Image: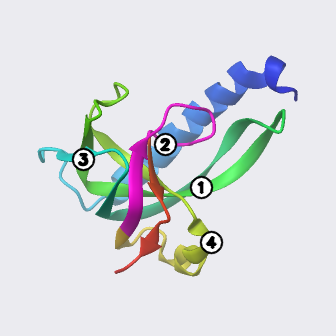
Amino acid sequence: MPCSTGVKKCLATAVAAIAQVTCIAQNASHGDSNLKPLEVRVNQPIALTGTLTSGTYDDCCSDGKVRRLTFYAVHLSRPVLFVEPPSLGWGPIVDVQLGSFGELSAGAERLGEHVTVKCARIWDTMTGHYAEHAWCDEAKIIR
């Protein structure tokens, strides 16, 4: 489906996938939603802990086409809140998409387990190229 005619459908599908993954992750969460969010800065290294999850979403308009992709994420034990620069308006974030999952693919059998993930950088996202509102770049499971 061409990007120009499929963007609305792509975004609706992505939102539905996020809602499904979030629900599954919340059921498996080790976290406490009443915890004060950890304040983070964009483009800074960080280690995150939570439940390893995965899902699929429609990446809108890569090379003019919508592509269905698998993604991995961490449902955080403690939410994060971007404070510098100010967040894109998401508020506290509980799910962070993991980038560079090639190195993590050996950890895919750990889905549903509590893990610690090291991110070279973290940032908030706002395009159809991401499944979650936050991205962990060069993610590595360290525990």
Rounded to the nearest angstrom, the CA distance separating label 4 from label 1 is 11 Å
Q: Looking at the image, which is closer to me, 101 or 9? A: 101
Q: What residue range appears in magenta?
A: 118-133
Rounded to the nearest angstrom, the CA distance separating label 1 from label 3 is 22 Å
User: Do labels 3 and 4 touch, CB within 8 Å?
Assistant: no
Q: Circle 4: is it few (<14), some (14-19), or many (20+) Cα within 10 Å?
A: few
Q: Which residue is mark 1?
A: 71
The residue shown at (59%, 55%) is 71
Q: Quadrant of the N terminus?
A: top right
Provide residue 15's location: percent of width, then percent of height: 55, 32
* Secondary structure of the residue carrying numbered label 2: loop
Amino acid at circle 4 = Gly
Provide residue 83's location: percent of width, then percent of height: 23, 36
Q: Residue furthest right?
A: 1
User: Do labels 2 and 1 touch, CB within 8 Å?
Assistant: yes
Amino acid at circle 1 = Phe
* Secondary structure of the residue carrying numbered label 3: strand
Q: Quadrant of the C terminus?
A: bottom left
Q: Earlier in the sequence, mark 2 or mark 4?
A: 4
Label number found at residue 40 = 3
Q: Earlier in the sequence, mark 3 or mark 2?
A: 3
